[in-house]
Structure formats: C-alpha cells, structure tokens
Amino acid sequence: MKQSRPRVILMNAILQIPTTESVKAACERFDRENELIEQTLSELFQQYPRNDDLRHVLLKVVAVNALYHTCIYALDTVARHIYAHGAEIDAALAVGSHEIVDKIAKVRVQGKVHNFFSFATKYCSWHQPEKYHIYDSRVDSYLWNLQQQNAFTAAFHHPHLWDYPKFHNIVVTFRDAHGLSTFTFKEIDKFLYLQGEPTFIPVPDEPQPGVGAFDFFPMQEFVAE
C-alpha cells in the first residue's frame, strides 16, 4: 500500500529571531504539555540503556514510534536490525558518533532499504540526549525557512538537513549564532519542535511506496541489489 508523507510549508509568516527568553518559554510549555511522555521514555531508556537484548530493543522501538509519532509499521524488523548491530550501536552511542544514526536509519524491509531518518535521530537522542539532536519535519521547515529569512550560516543547503553530521552542525551553529550556547541540546530540540507548530501546516506530498515513515522527511529508498 502506498503512503503519503506530510510536509510542512511556511504560511507567509515572519519568523521571530530566537532569544534566551523565547527558548525558556518554549521549554516550559513543552514540559507542561509533554510531561508524561517525556517521563515515560526517560524511565524506559534509563532502565534499558543497552541494545543487546532484543526484547528491550523492541520495547524502546515501539515506545519511540508510538509516543514520538514516527509511524514505522515494520517494528519487529527495525528492532531486529538494531539488535543485530547492538554492540556497534552501543559503542557508538557512548561516544556520540554521528555516523551511527545512518546505521540505525537504513533498514531492509521486503527487499528494499528504507531510511527511517527521523526515528533514528530520536532513538539516538533518547539514549544520549546531550549528544544527539532530533530531526523531524517541524525542525526541518523552521531551520530552512529561518535560514532563508535571516541566514545564520553560509554553509547551509537544504539537503544538508538530511545528512546527520551536517544537520547536527547546522543546529549547533544555529544555537551559537543566536547566543543560545547556555542551553542544552535537549532544550534546543524542544524550542525547534514548538517553533515548527504555529506558522506551518501539513500539506500532502506525492505518494511514496514503502513501510510507514510519515514523520521522516525526505523519503529515501534504495533498491536491493
């Protein structure tokens, strides 16, 4: 069955330049509105920090997928993929390797490799929230439209947001360029998530073949050899 992935577009709005006050306000609002979800995921990942037990991996995959709305239906396949590379993933997460995001994201399902990019960033972030920024369509649209309105870095092309090391560097540059270096990665993530909400709306895109991944943007598939 073909699925449509949502995108978001700017609705003729002027984005406000981020400030310390606006980030603090966003964090307070996010915490009020998402307290139960955040506490649940925090407790789960603290209880099962490693990826060497398939049951625990599946619990974490299901929880992130359900509570962070990544819309992946091949949950068992994704969990087995992570478990199969568990030792490599755990070692990479411990040092904050950006390349491991790609390893988690690329999953072979029914003969094709699907790129569950948004899910992978969230999965890594919940293991190491101060080493991994979260990507989703809201963050994508906010950062790209802010760059068009008031460029905060010269080294920024839209496809860079879909390359995790480059995406991470863009978010760090965004933070530093606006004098927000006192905030943690997690706090910046909360701000970026909420900034995508009031001035953007979902619009349909071309149908895409594959297994879920509505919250991941853009869709990428690689035909198996």
Image (cartoon, helix red, strand yellow):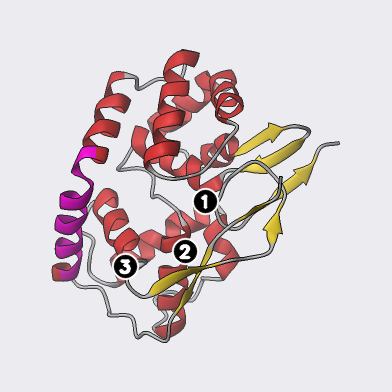
Residue type at the position of mark 1:
Tyr
SS label for mark 1: helix
Residue 75: give x, y in percent of width and height: 55, 29
- Residue at image point 20% right, 51% down: 33
Check if residue 159 falls in the magenta segment.
Answer: no
For this rendering, which residue is in front, 202 or 94? 202
Q: Which residues are magenta?
A: 22-36
Q: Is residue 79 visible?
A: yes
- Give the answer, above or below, for where 117 lies relative to 60: below
Alpha-carbon span between mark 3 and mark 1: 20 Å
Residue under circle 2? 140
Name the residue that disc number 1 marks.
164
Main secondary structure along the magenta-highlighted residues: helix
- For marks 2 and 3, the one nearer the N-term is 2
Residue 212, by quadrant, is top right
Q: Mark 3 and mark 2 in contact (Cβ < 8 Å)?
A: no
The kind of residue on which mark 3 rests is Gln
Label whose residue precedes the other's in the sequence (3 or 1):
1
Picture coordinates of residue 119 (x, y %)?
49, 42
Q: Residues within 10 Å of mark 1 (few under 14, many from 20)?
A: many
What residue appears at the point 27 percent right and 79 percent down from the top-left corner?
A: 17
The stretch drawn in magenta includes residue 33: yes
Q: Nearer the viewer, mark 1 or mark 2?
A: 2
